[in-house]
Image: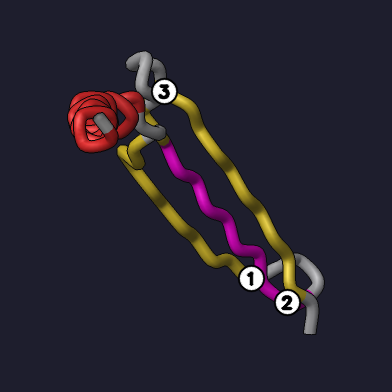
Amino acid sequence: MKTRALWMVLFSAAFLLPLAFSAGCAHEVAHSESDKPGWFGGRTHEETTVYRNPDGSLSTEHEKSHSNP
């Protein structure tokens, strides 16, 4: 009886595991970076990343950082 329950759990996991991976996360579509000198010294770094969500929509992430000497 225990082996039958074990087999049922293993078969259930085998069928449900691919579904968990197909739901997935967003995938990176494009990425760009730029470095520029700042107005009063230092540097300005900008990154822009575009992701495709599982539902087909796009989302954009933009980061900007400054470093002063």
Q: Residue 25: image x %, image y %? A: 40, 34
- Give the side of residue 33 with respect to residue 6, left or right: right
Residue type, label 3: Leu
Answer few, some or many: residues within 10 Å of disc 2's Cα (few below 14, many 20 plus, some between 14 and 19): few
Give the main secondary structure, helix, strand or loop, of the magenta stretch. strand
The number of numbered discs placed on residues in the rendered structure image is: 3
Q: Residue 60: image x %, image y %? A: 50, 32
- Nearer the N terminus, badge 2 or badge 1? 1
Q: Nearer the viewer, residue 1 or 50?
A: 1
Q: Which residues are magenta?
A: 41-50
Q: Secondary structure at mark 2?
A: loop
Q: Which mark is residue 42?
A: 2
| In the image, residue 47 above or below residue 9 | below
The residue under label 1 is: 37
- Give the side of residue 58 with respect to residue 40, left or right: left
Q: Secondary structure at mark 1?
A: strand
The residue under label 3 is: 58
Q: Nearer the viewer, residue 9 or 31?
A: 9
Between marks 3 and 2 in the image, the one whose residue lies nearer the viewer: 3
Q: Residue at x 79, y 77 (%)?
A: 68
Q: Which residue occupies the extreme front position in the image?
A: 1
Q: Residue at x 76, y 66 (%)?
A: 39
Q: Residue at x 67, y 72 (%)?
A: 43
Contact check, label 2 and label 1, Cβ < 8 Å:
yes
